[in-house]
Amino acid sequence: MKDLAMIKKAVMNSIEHAKTLEALDDVRVKYLSKKGEISQLMSELKNLSPEERPAFGARVNMLKQEVGDALAKKKEAIEDQLLMASLAREEMDVTLPGYQFYSGSIHPLNQVIEDLEDLFIGMGYKIAEGPEVENDYYNFEMMNLEKDHPARDMQDTFYINEEILLRTHTSPVQARTMLQSQGKPLKIICPGKVYRRDDDDPTHSHQFQQIEGLVIDKTISLANLKDALLKMARHLFGENREIRLRPSYFPFTEPSVEVDVSYIKKDGTTGYIEILGAGMVHPNVLKMGGYDPEVYSGFAFGVGVERIAILKYQIDDIRHFYTNDLRFLNQFKGDVR
Ligand code: DAH
């Protein structure tokens, strides 16, 4: 019993003076593990008289309990201290200046594309896409430009081989979508890159972007085309704009029109500036696409994305779009639409 009291004093003292979790665990091992001093006390039982054994056993168990409690309490205290110390260490100074994050922005050409996609999706159109490396067949023949058609001269391009080329316009997506739609009405716009064999200068680029539009149904007329184009022009340039259709020629439309949008000149009079080509889908194009031109009619248009952006933001050189000069691009941050 005397040993017990001494052990208790020693162990409590060690617990009190343990400064770290490791030191505390050493105390636990020293006294409470299987070979620990308190556990070993039980082996003393055999040296005691049968009358003394229960009381001694109870005391040892109580001591175990007390030491266990003291260890747990001290452990909590040390952990609290560690936490407080780490909080103090990690305290932050909210008055320090922050880091400046550089945020990018959507390229002006993509702003125009996304803006028009939103507009046309709102009018029930779907977005269609096609490959930039295209077959002569879709790029020209399905668009009613057979092999020796003179209008091909205006759309010379980069050839992979005799039959495969970089598409000169987004019009082949018309053909592809018609074939996919298998004679059913359709209403699509197709944004994408196109290529021409052109020398780059302030108004020409060998690569640029277009958005094609195509609507086919049983009762489509030029009035529907005009309605869609007027909505587009007003959405892009303002509600006070008018459009003007001038007769023109494209192999894939009949009649074909060139579309101008009105603007107020410096002297206050109204001028018109060309923004796109359009027309009623040529019967041959409908037929090749699997539509009976006696039953179905359609309109189509093709608009240059750069041209729209140039007019909208008064940009003086098409090459600004491609050279990625941040002084140019940063002018299109935020909502400039
Ligand atoms: N594909 C023509 C071009 O690149 C643009 C065009 C004109 C597209 C009239 C059309 C259209 O769909 O109807 O010059």
Image (cartoon, grey):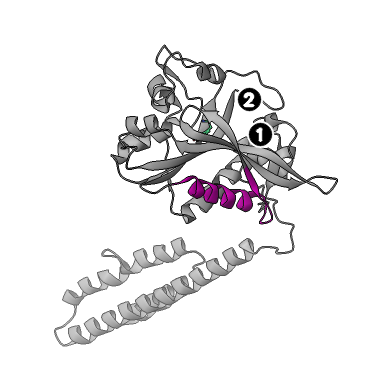
Tell me the crowding category of disc 1: few under 14, some 14 to 19, or many 20 or more residues within 10 angstroms, Cα based.
some
Callout 2: helix, strand or loop?
loop
Task: Please state which of the two labelled residues, at mark 2 or mark 1, is closer to the viewer.
Answer: 2
Callout 1: helix, strand or loop?
helix
User: Which residue is most to the left?
Assistant: 50
Task: From the image, tell me which residue sits under label 1.
Answer: 321
Q: x and y percent of residue 27 in the render?
A: 40, 66
Q: x and y percent of residue 140 in the render?
A: 43, 23
Which circle marks residue 205 in the picture? 2
Q: x and y percent of residue 103 in the render?
A: 64, 48
Residue 288 found in image quarter:
top left
Name which residue type carries label 1.
Phe
Q: x and y percent of residue 177 in the render?
A: 36, 37
Q: Which residues are magenta?
A: 221-244
As drawn, is 38 to the left or to the right of 129? Answer: left
- Asked whether the beta carbons under mark 2 and mark 1 sit within 8 Å of each other, the answer is yes
Q: Specify whether residue 228 is painted magenta.
A: yes
Tell me the crowding category of disc 2: few under 14, some 14 to 19, or many 20 or more residues within 10 angstroms, Cα based.
some
Picture residue at 37% right of the left edge, 75% below the top: 7
Residue 67 found in image quarter:
bottom left
Picture residue at 69% right of the left edge, 27% below the top: 203
**Residue sitting nearer the eye, 70 or 308:** 308
Which circle marks residue 298 in the picture? none
Above or below, 237 relative to 251: below
How many numbered discs? 2
Picture residue at 36% right of the left edge, 64% below the top: 30
Label 2 – label 1 distance at C-alpha: 10 Å
Q: Main secondary structure of the magenta part?
A: helix
Picture residue at 39% right of the left edge, 15% below the top: 163
